[in-house]
Image (tube, helix red, strand yellow):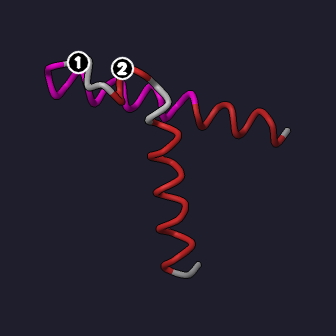
Amino acid sequence: MSVYKERNHIERFFNRIKHFRRVATRFEKHAANYLAMIKLASIRIWLRVNESMT
């Protein structure tokens, strides 16, 4: 995969994560809680993508 495609995937992923209000506004003040919200948002995005593939 080319560098451009990899960068494009990463940028699109971060744009999807920003749709989650708690992540975009940095609602969580502690780094551990913020990381947990990013992980939950990532899992939700991953599940949504894989659900549509089956």
Is the residue under label 2 in contact with that under label 1 (CB below 8 Å)? yes
Which residue is label 1 attached to? 28
Q: What residue type is labelled 2?
A: Arg
Which of the two residues, 38 or 18, is positioned nearer the viewer here?
A: 18
Q: Which mark is residue 19?
A: none
Residue sticking out furthest to the left: 30
- At 53% from the left and 40% from the top, the residue drawn is 16
As drawn, 5 above or below 19: below
Magenta stretch in the rendered image: 29-44
- The residue shown at (14%, 21%) is 30
Disc 1 crowd rating (10 Å Cα; few below 14, some 14-19, many 20+) is: some
State yes or no: residue 9 in magenta. no
Q: Mark 2 points at which residue?
A: 22
Q: Quadrant of the N terminus?
A: bottom right
The majority secondary structure of the magenta stretch comes to helix
**How far across and how far down the image is residue 17, in percent?**
46, 36
Give the crowd class for mark 2: few <14, some 14-19, many >=20 residues within 10 Å: some
* Total numbered labels placed on residues in the image: 2
Q: Which of marks 1 and 2 is nearer the N terminus?
A: 2
Label 2: state its secondary structure: helix
